[in-house]
Amino acid sequence: MRTRYLLCYDVRDASRLRRTAKVAETWGYRLQYSIFICDLSAMERAWLERSLREVLDLGADYAVLVDLGPPGRSSAGRITWVSGSARLPAPGEATVV
């Protein structure tokens, strides 16, 4: 079973930022510069977390995964755009493995 996650990060160093973006692009669909939607299995989530820990400075950088539930219409209903908006990916579209 797949779960949709919101991945957000704040990375203090340009080199780590590029590496973090590459990891995020591998697993998710970019909504903003440092915000991604990821549809992941439990195993894929573990791989994503491990990959992020390898590139982040855990003392200086931040990354968060927010569980949005199963992919689909219900997950889109849990997101409120205050300014602007982006097209959310269809279920399964957010994963590139």
Image (tube, rainbow, N blue to C red):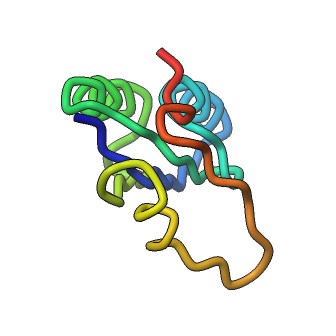
Q: Which of these two is toward me, 13 or 87?
A: 87
Q: Is residue 5 left or right of residue 79?
A: left
Q: Quadrant of residue 90?
A: top right
Q: Which of these two is toward me, 13 or 38?
A: 38
Q: Is residue 3 left or right of residue 57?
A: left
Residue drawn at x 39%, y 50% is 5
Residue 18 percent coordinates (x, y):
65, 31
Q: Is residue 66 above or below residue 93?
A: below
Q: Which of these two is toward me, 19 or 34?
A: 34
Q: Which of these two is toward me, 2 or 52?
A: 2
Residue furthest front in the image: 73
Q: Is residue 30 left or right of residue 9?
A: right
Residue furthest bottom in the image: 82
Q: Is residue 88 above or below residue 47?
A: below
Residue drawn at x 22%, y 34% is 1
Residue 64 percent coordinates (x, y):
37, 55
Residue drawn at x 63%, y 53% is 88
Q: Is residue 84 left or right of residue 73?
A: right
Residue 66 percent coordinates (x, y):
34, 59
Task: Please give the count of numbered marks on the rendered protein.
Answer: 0
Residue drawn at x 76%, y 81% is 83
Residue 3 percent coordinates (x, y):
30, 44
Residue furthest right in the image: 84
